[in-house]
């Protein structure tokens, strides 16, 4: 069984983070700044690479980078919001007044 090399990189020239398998881009998370906060409107992974946890690894890296930069985020992408619901340690990255917008007000 061949071991895949998985990595995530920021591609600021394309305003996205990319997940790579064996140095080939197989998915991405788009971001832009909105009112001083990082908005994440879309995350996508090639269906041929689905079911391997690549989207979760991608979102984890995006959220960790936001934490390192002390940035707040707006998870417009339903997958990102669902990830935060499942991993409540990232809830503090979403502004309190915006949490209801993303279905995160009941997360503790």
Image (cartoon, grey):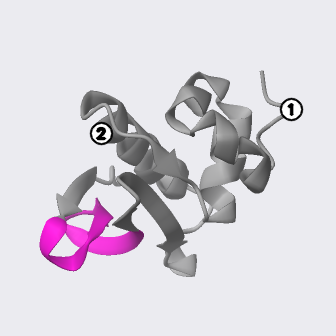
Q: Which residue is mark 1?
A: 106
Q: Give residue 65's position: percent from left, percent from top.
A: 30, 39
84 and 9: which one is in front? 84
Packing grade of label 2 (10 A; few <14, some 14-19, many >=20) is: few
Magenta residues, as a range?
A: 12-30
> Does residue 102 appear to the left or right of 60 in the view shown?
right
Is 70 placed above or below 28 here? above
Q: Quadrant of the C terminus?
A: top right
Q: Give residue 18's position: percent from left, percent from top.
A: 30, 65
Say which quarter of the image contains residue 22: bottom left
Please check the rendered image and state whether residue 39 is part of the magenta-colored stretch, yes or no: no
Q: Which residue is mark 2?
A: 65
Dot 2 lies on which element? Answer: helix
Disc 2 or 1, which lies upstream in sequence?
Answer: 2
Say which quarter of the image contains residue 92: top right
The furthest residue to the left: 13
* Disc 2/disc 1 C-alpha distance (Å): 24 Å
**Residue depicted at x 39% and y 69%:** 28
> Does residue 91 appear to the left or right of 68 in the view shown?
right
Dot 1 lies on which element? Answer: loop
């Amino acid at each position: 069984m061949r071991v895949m090399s998985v990595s995530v990189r920021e591609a600021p020239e394309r305003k996205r983070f990319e997940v790579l398998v064996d140095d080939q881009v197989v998915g991405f998370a788009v971001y832009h700044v909105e009112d001083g906060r990082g908005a994440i409107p879309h995350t996508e992974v090639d269906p041929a690479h689905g079911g391997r946890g690549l989207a979760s690894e991608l979102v984890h890296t995006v959220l960790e980078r936001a934490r390192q930069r002390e940035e707040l985020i707006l998870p417009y992408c339903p997958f990102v919001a669902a990830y935060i619901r499942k991993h409540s340690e990232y809830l503090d990255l979403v502004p309190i007044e915006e949490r209801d917008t993303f279905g995160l007000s009941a997360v503790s």
